[in-house]
């Protein structure tokens, strides 16, 4: 393992996270001296509540372990994200979490990290490397559950709009569910396909959704399998006065999303999600297992849950804390665990 530590730099540019020291004596090397361990989170996507919550989970689990954390944010610049992996390698980090990105830009960068002796996990990006565990939310199931709810609410024959950006692993997996549902239900007509990851994502997709809805007034269902996409479609539907005539189904959730789903007359009827903070925690735990010489498995899956507008209203859910209280699986996932592993406080 490459372990050229840089504590002076860490004190100025990283989060030196010291909690969890009480359990460090029981942890295996190198986590028995967690202050000597540095991990890096290399991000492709960071805009939106989901990614802020994911970052929070990474931070709190790193703090519980007592390791140092560096966050490198490429802001959707694929070439820069690859360069940031190389920066982390040059800094001598012990482990790297690659968060989203494009396969073609991340494949070689991830392999360079592995060749340098650095442990790597990847969240929602397929780096095509058997040495790198994939952290995911079962994105196929996210899409399938949302679409099954759309059929339950609207029948198996409707005109649909769809938001999709190819080349992003979680969206590609959700796209498989969309194609399967259409094939199994020939009465579902895809009248418009839109999608962009340009910032700000919600507003950029609102512009496209507005045009699609104006050109296709028969659209009654919009499948927007990412919460920023769903926000964009909702903005367009509200502006056009169509909220009462259509339904939006999505993936992912945040406190802001809950408020939007619960607005009177909101078209946003259901989403399927995991707690992004929990996914962040799982990402760090999987990496910690690898650092300790243990195997988290090739695929580390955090199971998702269907959340309907009706449930949110009936239970008076106002935020993620309320949702966690009503859905305990949102507070913690028993995934990538070990007896020696300290957890964030609950």
Image (spheres, helix red, strand yellow):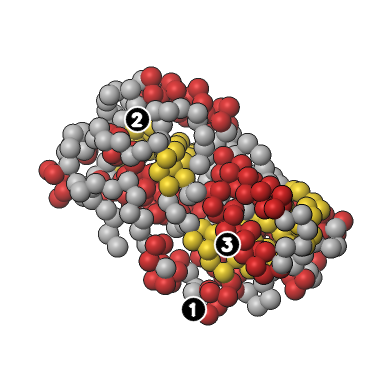
Residue corresponding to mark 3: 271
Discs 2, 1 touching: Cβ within 8 Å: no
Is residue 260 visible to the viewer in this orientation of the structure?
A: no
**Which residue of the protein is positioned furthest toward the front in this rendering?**
184
Q: Residue at x 38, y 66 (%)?
A: 328
Which residue does the numbered mark 1 point to in the structure image? 315
Separation of disc 2 and disc 1 at Cα? 42 Å
| Marks 2 and 1, the one that precedes in the sequence | 2
Residue ID at (42%, 68%) = 327
Q: Could you tell which of marks 1 and 3 lies nearer the N-terminus?
A: 3
Q: Residues within 10 Å of mark 1 (few under 14, many from 20)?
A: few
Disc 2 designates what residue?
A: 119
Q: Position of residue 187 (x, y in %)?
A: 78, 58
Disc ID at residue 56:
none
Identify the element where label 2 is drawn: strand
Q: Nearer the viewer, mark 2 or mark 3?
A: 3
> Tag 3's secondary structure?
strand
Q: Quadrant of the N terminus?
A: top left
Indicate the position of residue 213 as horizontal and vertical percent values. 81, 59
Kindly check if marks 2 and 3 are in contact, taking CB atoms under 8 A apart as contact.
Answer: no
Residue 333 appears left or right of 252: left
Q: Residue at x 41, y 31 (%)?
A: 132
> How far, Cα to Cα, is label 1 from label 3?
16 Å
Residue 168 sits in which quadrant? Answer: top right
Of 240 and 136, the residue lying toward us? 136
Image position of 134 (left or right of 294): right
């Amino acid at each position: 393992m490459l372990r050229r530590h840089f504590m002076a730099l860490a004190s100025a540019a990283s989060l030196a996270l010291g909690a969890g020291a009480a359990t460090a004596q029981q942890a295996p090397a190198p986590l028995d001296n967690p202050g000597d361990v540095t991990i890096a989170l290399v991000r492709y996507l960071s805009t939106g509540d989901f990614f802020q919550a994911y970052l929070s989970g990474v931070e709190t689990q790193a703090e519980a372990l007592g390791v140092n954390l560096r966050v490198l944010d490429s802001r959707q610049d694929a070439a820069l994200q690859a360069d940031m992996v190389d920066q982390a390698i040059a800094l001598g980090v012990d482990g790297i979490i690659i968060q989203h990105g494009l396969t073609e830009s991340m494949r070689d960068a991830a392999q360079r990290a592995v060749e340098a002796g650095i442990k790597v996990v990847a969240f929602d990006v397929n780096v095509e490397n058997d040495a790198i565990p994939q952290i995911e939310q079962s994105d196929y199931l996210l899409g399938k559950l949302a679409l099954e709810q759309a059929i339950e609410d609207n029948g198996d024959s409707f005109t649909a709009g769809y938001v999709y950006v190819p080349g992003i692993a979680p969206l590609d997996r959700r796209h498989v569910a969309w194609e399967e549902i259409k094939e199994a239900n020939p009465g579902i007509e895809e009248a418009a396909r839109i999608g962009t990851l340009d910032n700000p994502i919600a507003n950029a997709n609102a512009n496209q959704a507005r045009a699609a809805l104006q050109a296709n007034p028969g659209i009654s269902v919009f499948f927007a399998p990412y919460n920023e996409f769903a926000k964009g479609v909702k903005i367009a539907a509200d502006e056009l006065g169509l909220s009462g005539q259509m339904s939006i189904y999505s993936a992912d959730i945040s406190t802001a999303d809950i408020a939007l789903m619960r607005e009177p007359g909101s078209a946003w009827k259901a989403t399927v999600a995991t707690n992004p903070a929990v996914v962040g925690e799982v990402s760090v735990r999987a990496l910690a297992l690898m650092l300790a010489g243990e195997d988290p498995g090739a695929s580390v899956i955090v199971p998702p849950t269907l959340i309907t507008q009706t449930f949110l209203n009936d239970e008076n859910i106002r935020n993620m804390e309320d949702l966690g209280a009503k859905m305990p699986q949102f507070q913690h996932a028993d995934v990538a665990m070990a007896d020696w592993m300290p957890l964030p406080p609950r």
